[in-house]
Amino acid sequence: MKQAQHQPSRRDMRRALTAVAAALAAMVSLTLPIAPAMAQQQKIKIGLMLPYTGTYAALGNAITNAFKLYVDENGGKLGGREVEYFVVDDESDPSKAPDNANKLVKRDKVDVLVGTVHSGVALAMAKVARDNSTLLIIPNAGAGDITGPLCAPNIFRTSFSNWQPGYAMGKIAAEQKKKTAVTFTWKYAAGEESTGGFKEGFEAGGGKVVKEMTLPFPQVEFQSYLTEIAALKPDVVYVFFAGGGAVKFVKDYAAAGLNKTIPLYGPGFLTDGTLEAQGDAAQGLLTTLHYADGLNNPKDKAFRAAYLKAFKAEPDVYAVGGYDAAQLLNVGLTAVKGDISKRNELVAAMESAKIDSPRGPMTLSKAHNPVQDIYLRKVEGKENKVIGVAVKALADPARGCKL
Ligand code: PHB
């Protein structure tokens, strides 16, 4: 009997089970509605895939610094959510890019990919972003295809297309009545698209590109090409080199004495973030870019002061791309109150964003590429002084984009 008294009857069991089921149901009904709110309290995971070694290392660091600067200025948050970084050195190596991007997306499960500098690496990132529907913001790489045939609702760029500064410089050279040009660059998307843009602008204005020279990225053995330029004697030389390669090219061009006889033009990457190292060799160079020294707008002044204070260095065009990537993401996340799962609303807010950029006001084209003034700049001392606007509100043609 005693035993029987302690043994639960079937009825007791049923009651107990019903009570447990009811409690569970209550818990589920409680948890479900608050799930999104809890998700918003989790940190937003940002995958920074950028070069921290190699010829573009300084560029990757400037982008990272400025992205983090904006987040810090915003109380360590974007769209009200704290930020957690997952950082990968992409080494500007396209062959490693699919693995690197997949690690961030599949292993670290980042909410947003931010990167990169090198167009070849960025093209691989765009493929991973498209395959996984991951939000991707490109703070530098100008590959035309990304806002051309590969354009997508989840892919944005806060920098430029390689075509934009190239086209503007070609237009300027033609306006200056230069007749012949030689182009020279690394043989990969950025260089070929930049020199292609120059050729388009130059030849539309009546000039002729008489020779297009390339060497593999990131080689810097320029001597034989300089000899050929000297022999060809064009009215102007247009080159795309950046980072460490730009430093070496500008110095070699001057050392060969060519800066005295044939004007050297380029997109502003040739002299941005490099003047300290280029010194006298860069003086007087004309370049075109969506950023310059001496813009003197309030946002730029504040940005420069804050960057200088935080990193004891002057910001450059790369820093601007990184800063604006964070600004753009903040616009999207703020519109959805941090709920990144609301993809359509987030994308719509980013598409119509009016960014107060250090470069001046920035909006995006339908293809998600900045529509922006391209400045004409001249190297004076350690500055790329703005001396005019080469093309106002220039949009990339976005050939092949079906958005
Ligand atoms: C690019 O690969 O798209 C690229 C790299 C460095 C620059 C600009 C563009 O300064």
Image (cartoon, rainbow, N blue to C red):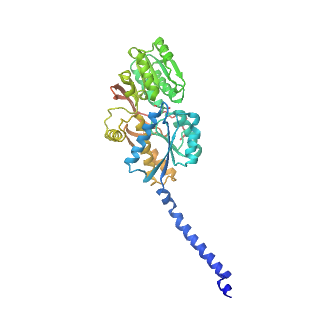
Q: Could you tell me if residue 120 is visible in this image?
A: yes
Can you say whether 278 is above or below 5 in the image?
above
Q: Which residue does the image show at 54% across and 39% down from the upper left?
A: 151
Outermost bottom residue: 1
Left or right: residue 187 compared with residue 80 = right
Q: Name the spot of residue 244 as percent of width and height, x first.
A: 45, 28
Is residue 360 or residue 259 the one in the foreground?
259
Coordinates of residue 153 in the picture (x, y in percent): 52, 44
Give residue 389's quadrant in the image. Answer: top left
* Residue 54 placement (x, y as % from top left): 49, 31
Q: At 57% across and 48% down in the image, what residue appears?
A: 107
Q: Residue furthest top?
A: 231
3 w.r.t. 173: above or below: below
Residue 41 to residue 140: above or below: below
In this orientation, does residue 353 appear? no
How many tags in the picture? 0
Q: Residue at x 57, y 44 (%)?
A: 103
In this image, 385 relative to 342: left or right? left
Q: Position of residue 370 (x, y in %)?
A: 44, 38
- Near-viewer residue (134 or 69): 69
Q: Nearer the viewer, residue 199 or 302?
A: 302
- What is the quadrant of the N terminus in the image? bottom right
